[in-house]
Image: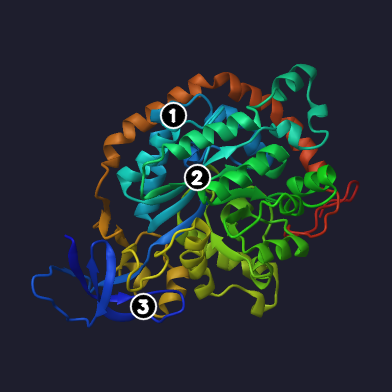
């Protein structure tokens, strides 16, 4: 249907507007206008929405499509353990493996009310045209929007943290600090991808992964590519205390200050996590017009800390909301991310005026997310905007009774009331089922692919088991050093302090 009316729903147009009963005329994938509840137009089909809450599609501002096959595989892993596991759980993948992992994630996002995602995706050793096409095609098949940023690094994890490699046995040190692709090769690979991109609902972006994992040549090259092609850029920035301390040791200033000095920051820039940003870092990001993607679930699961979102907002930063990867959040549920963001703000301080409100959190998951992704015409239900929306069943137990709609959306909804989801005027979920993908038919192939990957990467998984004790000793000891801010729920004990 090129034109139709969603009739009589309870419509929540945006974070700053009350929900009201009305109808929506959709033409050619966009919202043409809002009508009275019982409005009908000659020759225009009507879709009954009288028992539905209609809200803007949620926007996930930080996730990783390559992680979906590995959800639920780790318990009590820090960020550094997760990073060290990479070759074992992400390595030696085929284009089909990448497609299945992305498809599974896109399906979960759609079924849980998400219509757009910022995907920092990993392909080793270099991103390729074929690899990025397999990722984009999975989003195409489900029907979701995506900003796809291949992750880039020319410095290994073991070289990025000062003195960490010294803790390795000599045979491991040589093996793990072997050179990654050179910055020129990485930038050339990305340019080839950009020059051959042909997916309109899915856009390319840049994902230099972590500041200390990139040489200055890589960072300035990404800066120049972003300017040349008009690209968004997302970076894991000061996610953990280890990263923040390592940056200060390596550069003599914070990671944010170093990127600022290189001219990397700007309105196109999104810092993923930002848990260990201090006031000067936030000031720099705010002046640059940059965004931060807040990922409260992942930050807690990985023990990274509690980000100070209120301070970010006070510094003028656009704060969006994400889930992070499925293996460090164990789901891709943006309703859960909203609820977690609200609750985390409550335990950071007893000052209630500093807590995030439900409208603020909903804005992070919609309008602010659109800004972080560089997308126009989404994040709100407004005339002329794309018809990216979610319909929730008001007869579901989550909505009985229906009180304050935004508060209930953030605090009570968990994705189980999702009835239908639309992107650009096309249904991608209808009556709780995907419209474009028969996910159940792929279950066997997904399980087989995972088993084959485990077998293929058995040597890397065995290596990771040898590395766990090194990281489990080195990183906690490093974190006993003071930093400019404290982001743990309790102060980290100094060496020699008694427990408790």
- Could you tell me which secondary element the residue under label 3 belongs to? loop
Label disc, if present, on residue 402 of the rendered structure: 3
Disc nearer the start of the sequence (2/1):
2
Point out the image quarter for the N terminus.
bottom left
- Could you tell me which secondary element the residue under label 2 belongs to? helix
Please say if 351 is above or below 476: below
Q: Nearer the viewer, residue 29 or 459?
A: 29
Looking at the image, which residue sits at the far right? 496
Looking at the image, which residue sits at the far top? 171
Q: Residue at x 37, y 68 (%)?
A: 398
Residue under label 1: 450
Residue under label 2: 326
The crowding category of the residue bearing disc 3, from other C-alpha atoms within 10 Å (few below 14, some 14 to 19, many at least 20), is few
- Could you tell me which secondary element the residue under label 1 belongs to? helix
**Rendering colour mode:** rainbow
Does residue 194 appear in the picture of this structure? yes
Residue 120 locus on image (x, y percent):
53, 44
Q: Nearer the viewer, residue 413 or 68?
A: 68
Q: Mark 2 and mark 3: span between their CA atoms?
A: 31 Å
């Amino acid at each position: 249907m090129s034109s139709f009316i969603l009739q009589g729903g309870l419509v929540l147009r945006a974070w700053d507007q009350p929900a009201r009963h009305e109808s929506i005329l959709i033409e050619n994938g966009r919202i043409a206008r809002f009508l009275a509840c019982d409005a009908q137009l000659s020759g225009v089909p009507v879709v009954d929405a009288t028992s539905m809450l209609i809200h803007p599609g949620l926007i996930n501002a930080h996730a990783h499509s390559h992680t979906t096959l590995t959800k639920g595989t780790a318990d009590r892993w820090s960020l550094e353990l997760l990073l060290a596991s990479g070759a074992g759980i992400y390595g030696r993948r085929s284009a089909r493996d990448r497609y299945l992992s992305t498809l599974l994630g896109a399906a979960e996002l759609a079924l849980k009310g998400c219509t757009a995602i910022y995907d920092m995706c990993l392909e080793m050793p270099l991103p390729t045209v074929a690899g990025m096409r397999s990722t984009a095609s999975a989003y195409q098949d489900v029907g979701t929007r995506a900003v796809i940023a291949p992750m880039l690094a020319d410095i290994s994890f073991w070289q990025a943290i000062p003195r960490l490699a010294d803790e390795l046995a000599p045979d491991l040190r040589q093996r793990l600090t072997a050179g990654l692709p050179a910055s020129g090769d990485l930038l050339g690979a990305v340019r080839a991808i950009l020059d051959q991109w042909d997916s309109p609902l899915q856009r390319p972006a840049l994902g230099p992964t972590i500041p200390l994992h990139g040489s200055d040549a890589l960072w300035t090259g990404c800066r120049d590519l972003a300017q040349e092609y008009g690209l968004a850029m997302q970076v894991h920035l000061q996610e953990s205390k280890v990263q923040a301390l390592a940056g200060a040791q390596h550069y003599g200033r914070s990671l944010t200050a170093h990127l600022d000095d290189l001219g990397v920051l700007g309105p196109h820039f999104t810092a993923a996590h930002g848990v260990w940003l201090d006031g000067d870092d936030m000031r720099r990001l705010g002046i640059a017009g940059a965004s931060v993607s807040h990922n409260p679930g992942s930050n807690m699961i990985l023990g990274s800390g509690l980000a100070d979102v209120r301070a970010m907002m006070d510094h003028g930063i656009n704060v969006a909301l994400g889930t992070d990867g499925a293996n460090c959040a164990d789901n891709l549920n943006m309703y859960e991310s909203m609820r977690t963001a609200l609750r985390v703000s409550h335990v950071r301080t007893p000052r209630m005026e500093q807590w995030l409100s439900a409208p603020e959190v909903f804005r992070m998951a919609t309008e602010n997310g659109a800004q972080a992704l560089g997308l126009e015409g989404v994040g709100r239900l407004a005339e002329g905007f794309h018809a990216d929306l979610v319909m929730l069943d008001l007869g579901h137990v989550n909505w009985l009774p229906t009180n304050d709609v935004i508060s209930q959306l953030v605090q009570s909804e968990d994705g189980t009331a999702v009835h239908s989801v639309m992107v650009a005027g096309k249904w991608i979920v209808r009556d709780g089922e995907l419209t474009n993908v028969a996910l159940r038919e792929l279950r066997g192939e997904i399980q087989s692919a995972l088993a084959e990957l485990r077998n293929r990467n058995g040597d890397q998984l065995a290596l990771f088991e040898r590395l766990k004790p090194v990281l489990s000793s080195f990183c906690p000891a490093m974190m006993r050093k003071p930093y400019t801010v404290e982001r743990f729920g309790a102060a980290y004990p100094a060496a020699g302090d008694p427990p408790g």
